[in-house]
Amino acid sequence: MKIKKTALAAAIAVLLSFTACGTTENSEPSESESENETLQNTEAETTIAETEAITEAVTEADEENTEEDTTAATEPQEFTPVEGLSENYADLENRSFAYNGKVFTLGKNTLQDLIDGGIPFKESELNNTGNNVNKNYSSGTYTVEINDFVNMQFEFINTTETNITEAECLLQYVRWYSIYVPQPDYEDSLNEEITNNINDAANYVCFSFPLTLTKEQLLENNSDTTEITENNCVNYYIDSEVYMGTSGYHFEFNKNTDQLKEASISWLP
């Protein structure tokens, strides 16, 4: 903006210099002087036109810069979980996630519920939904490819006293993971692509925590951890009342940046 205003000032100065030139009031202009005056008037008119053009350009630039400044000042929207999810990032009383705004809860919803809810499992794996599962056994793993870098995995469990199909089993395990997360030594274009894929996944998948979660943000939200490992994992587990073992939340963060690379929720009655 300073450069354009300087150009405007220079143009005005030129215009004033032409206005100051000319013959005196009492002298009779000669033919040469008349020609010079005509030339000066023409140049002055040209300068006025140029000055008006510069003024218009400066005004337009001011408006554009104002719009750009407003856009740059806009803060990103704060993460808000889908209604029905907890504000606690590791809520052991509400182990849920959402897909396209529909909430699914571990230990409550079945594989068939997730299929009916529009979760796009691989076609080859959907052929297994009619398979029998013995009591106290789990199904095979079901996979969803969210985009080039982001995937989800699911497992289901038969907690009844009889054999049932995989479609009837309860959701026992859900895992979200990104193949890559941004790194300081990556090229900017790659980091941008990775970030775009994670943000794209957030348009479909929602947990009680943001997919760009950092370790610091997790611990600030919920410090009641059961384990923080040397591999930069944070766990929130409780013992099962029915089976041998534990279940809950598992978070794994990148060792260089502390950004979330995968998260899983498990359930056992």
Image (tube, grey):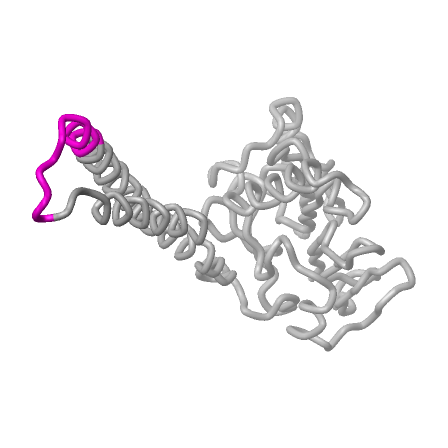
Name the foreground residue: 155 vs 29: 29
Does residue 206 appear to the left or right of 228 in the view shown?
Answer: left
Relative to 38, does residue 63 appear above or below in the rendering? below
Residue 16 shown in magenta: no
Q: Image quadrant for the C terminus?
A: bottom right
Does residue 72 appear to the left or right of 254 in the view shown?
Answer: left
Relative to 108, does residue 241 appear above or below in the rendering? below
- Expressed as whole percent of the image width and height from the top left, the position of residue 57 reads 31, 42
- Expressed as whole percent of the image width and height from the top left, the position of residue 216 reads 72, 69
Name the foreground residue: 128 vs 231: 231
Please give the name of the residue rendered at 68% of the width and 52% of the height, measured from the top-left corner: 159
Does residue 198 appear to the left or right of 42 in the view shown?
Answer: right
Please give the range of residues in magenta.
25-39
Name the foreground residue: 8 vs 77: 8
Residue 38 shown in magenta: yes
Q: Is residue 74 visible?
A: yes
- Expressed as whole percent of the image width and height from the top left, the position of residue 234 reads 79, 64
Please give the name of the residue rendered at 28% of the width and 47% of the height, measured from the top-left corner: 17
Name the foreground residue: 210 vs 66: 66
Does residue 1 appear to the left or right of 45 in the view shown?
Answer: right
Relative to 95, does residue 177 appear above or below in the rendering? above
Rendered image quadrant of residue 21 = top left
Q: Is residue 161 visible?
A: no
